[in-house]
């Protein structure tokens, strides 16, 4: 018979708040920041006031002290319990009953101000109106944290209301009883399931998911962030600050803000671990950062200090703004303009890791590093290299490049992997087959668009390049360029073609300026194409047909034959764009 992993304990709320204040209950940082809206905190107090249950708590009896305490200031005791489930509720209750701010998911301090009207037991999010209304306790925190005794507090509140309107004796009793009941919430009973200290991190994560179907699965990145909170909290806060600033356009100062990604701390952590320890599997990195010898299983404080020093050095490189933005130049060189063309965050972040390995481990810089990373990123995106078993694949790639031995060896390793994936069969068979799709969010489609940018292609029937029209820094009511159905939907419907896979096929769409797209409307290509083609000379028109993979006479072709022909041509243009990235350049290395 299996051993029970938990026990059940009943707590009055006041005991939980006291233990949090003393530091005996702490957050393990395996959940997200405080994300509740203040209205949800209001509803929590309303439910408690009405005597409704608010759910159980899940604690973990933990004896290693690796936790972040709730609230601010120094704590007297080492945590004995970590909150696994109930973080938002306990943080809300502690913040209100102790009148302390919380850090929200944007890493900004936020006050949780809840008002209460005793006359009808109404809870409200504090507003200017409730603050002016003498019928309201402006901020219920004062019921528990005020300097007055409870009796004196109730007496003064009644005097304030009486100054505004006459109160009958029964009304005074009713209001006093309501405030008593509010103050008595400190004795509200909660039930906690306490996992014993023999439960490991993976079991905690599994228990959390099994008992809380709405909760987010806990992962190894969460546990590593927990270790950072204890042993290098400054490093964690640096990552959080970087993540926050990457979401805000810069005011002219150097900033991680970009058009490709709003990274989470866990994304940055993944790159730091890869660079610092040559590991992609975070479960190994967690053990390493605890100071564990992976062969003997021994844990050493000295080893832990040494490993955190390695992580610190790696993170300095990962968060270096020059490295960060130079990497995005490689993506632009590969034809990608913004996150709208990137289907996988893993491809993007692991591409950054490979960039940093080339720079930090092999001294590559400048155009040579940019060119090889551009080729690598193009391949990763068109093949979906890091979708699926991303950690396993990246671990293999890290092992390959760490054995490269030199800058030339590093480039050679990446190019060999690229060539092993982008074979003749890939270009002529696999890619045309994958283009037989109606997806609007396809890595193969975006690779074609990237190739058009590499080739400096103009939009169909336009004198402007696609990359000019796709400029992510320009925002207007209408997108400057739109993906037009070459054979319009209504025209195809009139031909009896209604199947979405055929109508919306990738091969039936091309970039045109939005005004042209509107003017063309539902005209058949046999009507609109000669009109628009007349804008250009023969050479220009031939070049445009090449870029947009249009066979000669396409506008009069059988529709399905057109799709088949165009898929082959799209694949060829995509290949041509990629091959423009394969130019030979001399090696540049850093002087350091």
Image: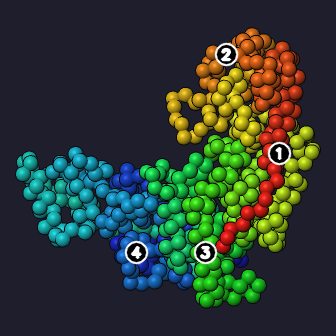
Relative to 453, residue 306 above or below = below
Q: Can residue 54 be seen in this view?
A: no
Q: What element does badge 2 sit on?
A: helix
Toward the viewer: 498 or 196? 498
Left or right: 131, with 395 as reference point: left
Q: Which of marks 4 and 1 is nearer the N terminus?
A: 4
Toward the viewer: 195 or 556? 556
Residue 153 lies in what quarter of the image? Answer: bottom left
At horizontal 88% and vertical 23% (from top left) the residue drawn is 561
At horizontal 76% and vertical 56% (from top left) the residue drawn is 372
Residue highlighted by disc 4: 20
Q: Residue 520 carries which label?
A: 2
Q: Earlier in the sequence, mark 2 or mark 4?
A: 4
Q: Residues within 10 Å of mark 1 (few under 14, many from 20)?
A: few
Spot occupied by residue 478 in the image (x, y as percentages of width and height): 55, 28
Task: Identify the residue at the far top of this view.
Answer: 527
Residue highlighted by disc 1: 579
* Label 3 with label 1: CB-CB less than 8 Å: no
Residue highlighted by disc 3: 313
């Amino acid at each position: 018979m299996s051993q029970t992993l938990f026990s059940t304990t009943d707590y009055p709320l006041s005991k939980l708040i006291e233990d949090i204040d003393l530091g005996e209950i702490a957050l393990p940082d395996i959940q997200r920041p405080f994300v509740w809206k203040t209205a949800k905190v209001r509803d929590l107090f309303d439910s408690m006031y009405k005597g409704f249950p608010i759910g159980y708590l899940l604690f973990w009896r933990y004896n290693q002290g690796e936790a972040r305490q709730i609230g601010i200031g120094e704590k007297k005791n080492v945590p004995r319990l970590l909150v696994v489930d109930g973080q938002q509720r306990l943080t809300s209750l502690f913040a209100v009953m102790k009148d302390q701010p919380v850090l929200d998911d944007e890493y900004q301090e936020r006050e949780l101000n809840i008002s209460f009207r005793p006359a009808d037991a109404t809870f409200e999010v504090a507003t200017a109106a409730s603050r002016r209304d003498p019928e309201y306790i402006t901020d219920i925190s004062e019921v528990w944290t005020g300097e007055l005794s409870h009796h004196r507090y109730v007496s003064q509140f009644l005097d304030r209301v009486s100054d505004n309107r006459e109160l009958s004796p029964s009304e005074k009793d009713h209001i006093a009883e309501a405030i008593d009941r509010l103050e008595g919430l400190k004795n509200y009973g909660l039930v906690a399931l306490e996992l014993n200290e023999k439960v490991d991190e993976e079991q905690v994560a599994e228990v959390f998911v099994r008992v809380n179907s709405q909760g987010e699965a806990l992962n190894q990145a969460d546990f590593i962030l927990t270790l950072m909170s204890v042993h290098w909290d400054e490093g964690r806060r640096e990552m959080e600050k970087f993540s926050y600033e990457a979401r805000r356009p810069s005011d002219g100062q150097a900033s991680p803000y970009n058009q490709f990604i709003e990274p989470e701390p866990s994304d940055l952590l993944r790159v730091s671990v890869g660079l610092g320890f040559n590991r992609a599997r975070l479960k190994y990195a967690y053990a390493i950062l605890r100071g564990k010898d992976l062969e003997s299983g021994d844990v050493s404080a000295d080893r832990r200090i040494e490993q955190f020093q390695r992580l610190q050095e790696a993170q300095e490189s990962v968060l270096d703004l020059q490295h960060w933005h130079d990497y995005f130049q490689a993506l632009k060189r590969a034809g990608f303009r913004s996150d709208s063309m990137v289907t996988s965050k893993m491809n993007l972040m692991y591409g950054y890791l490979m960039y940093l390995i080339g720079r930090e481990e092999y001294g590559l810089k400048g155009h040579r590093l940019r060119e090889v990373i551009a080729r690598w990123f193009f391949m990763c995106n068109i093949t979906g290299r890091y979708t699926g078993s991303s950690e396993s694949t990246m671990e293999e790639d890290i092992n390959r490049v760490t054995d490269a031995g030199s800058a030339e060896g590093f480039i050679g390793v990446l190019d060999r992997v690229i060539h092993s994936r982008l074979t003749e069969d890939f270009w002529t068979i696999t890619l045309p087959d994958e283009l037989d799709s109606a997806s609007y969010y396809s890595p193969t489609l975006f690779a074609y668009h990237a190739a058009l940018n590499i080739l400096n292609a103009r939009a169909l029937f336009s004198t402007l390049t696609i990359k000019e029209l796709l400029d992510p820094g320009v925002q207007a009511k209408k997108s400057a360029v739109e993906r037009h159905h070459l054979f319009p939907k209504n025209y195809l419907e009139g031909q009896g073609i209604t199947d979405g896979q055929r109508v919306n096929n990738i091969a039936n769409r091309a970039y045109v300026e939005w005004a042209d797209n509107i003017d063309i409307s539902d005209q058949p290509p046999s009507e609109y194409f000669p009109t628009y083609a007349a804008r250009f000379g023969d050479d220009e028109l031939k070049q445009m047909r090449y870029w947009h993979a249009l066979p000669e006479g396409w506008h009069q072709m059988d529709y399905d034959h057109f799709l088949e022909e165009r898929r082959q041509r799209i694949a060829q243009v995509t290949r041509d764009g990629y091959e423009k990235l394969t130019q030979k350049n001399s090696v540049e290395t850093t002087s350091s």
